[in-house]
Amino acid sequence: MVKRTVLVVEDEEDIRELISYTLLKEGYQVASVRSGEEALAIATSHPPDLVLLDLMLPGIDGLTVCQRLRSHATSAATAIVILSAKGEDADVVTGLNVGANDYITKPFSREVLIARVRAALRNVAPRTERGDRPSDSENVIHVHNMAIHPGRHAVLVDGQPVELSATEFRVLLVLARKPGWVFTREQILDAVHGDNYAITSRAVDVQILGLRRRLRNAGKHIETVRGVGYRLKE
């Protein structure tokens, strides 16, 4: 079985070594760097399965690194989990909106770190020994005028590509896998970020608004079920 690979991006040596040791003990293959420039060089040339990304870095900051990884073809599907001492709702929402899959506030326990890493990797197809992702074209979801490709992190509306943030894409994926089913805000939040996520469920409303806007005419298929949550029309 191929080990899942994690890149730790943290400028504080003690924290970087502690995180790396913890992940190694759990059986992950780990690389670590201290700057945004190093992170971009490694993650775009030899993309890991997951990047643990500090925000306060020398040189290029973590938010910029996250944006660039999402816009680069080779790293677009890599899971990104932000680690930051900034724990306000606005900080978390900003991190998710630039493309992070999850956001962990410092300080954090070993148990929380491992749980969040496992949760993020559940949505990432493992790389083969050649470093590529296995073909999953058979998993493309066709609903209404949309084609949703989980492995490529891509959405086509009427055959034209639509750019979504990582969080918006996961929200759409939750709804599209079960058209007609109604999901509460809490269910969507748990499905996208895992249990006990430290952010208000109302943040889902913000993601839905953005998702509808980006999907253009396909956005009308996402329905609000008053007093309950959201669903994608059958």
Image: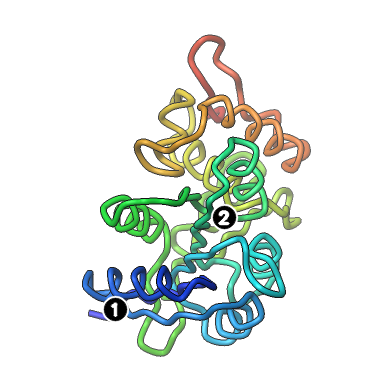
Please name whichever residue, 17 or 118, is drawn nearer the observer in this view of the structure: 17
Residue name at image x 72 percent, y 54 percent: 163
- Return the x and y of residue 24 as percentages of the image width and height: 27, 76
Point out the frontmost of discs 2 and 1: 2
Please name whichever residue, 129 or 216, is drawn nearer the observer in this view of the structure: 129
- Return the x and y of residue 130 as percentages of the image width and height: 41, 90
Mark 2: few/some/many CA within 10 Å (<14, 14-19, 20+): many
Q: Mark 1 belongs to which amino acid?
A: Lys
Residue name at image x 43 percent, y 27 percent: 186
| Local SS, label 2 | loop
Mark 2–mark 1 distance (CA, rounded to whole Å): 22 Å
- Which label is found at residue 3? 1
Quickly name the residue at label 2. 100
164, above or below 74, in the image: above
Residue name at image x 38 percent, y 42 percent: 194
Residue 222, image quadrant:
top right
146, above or below 231, in the image: below
Please name whichever residue, 102 or 8, is drawn nearer the observer in this view of the structure: 8
Q: Mark 2 belongs to which amino acid?
A: Ala
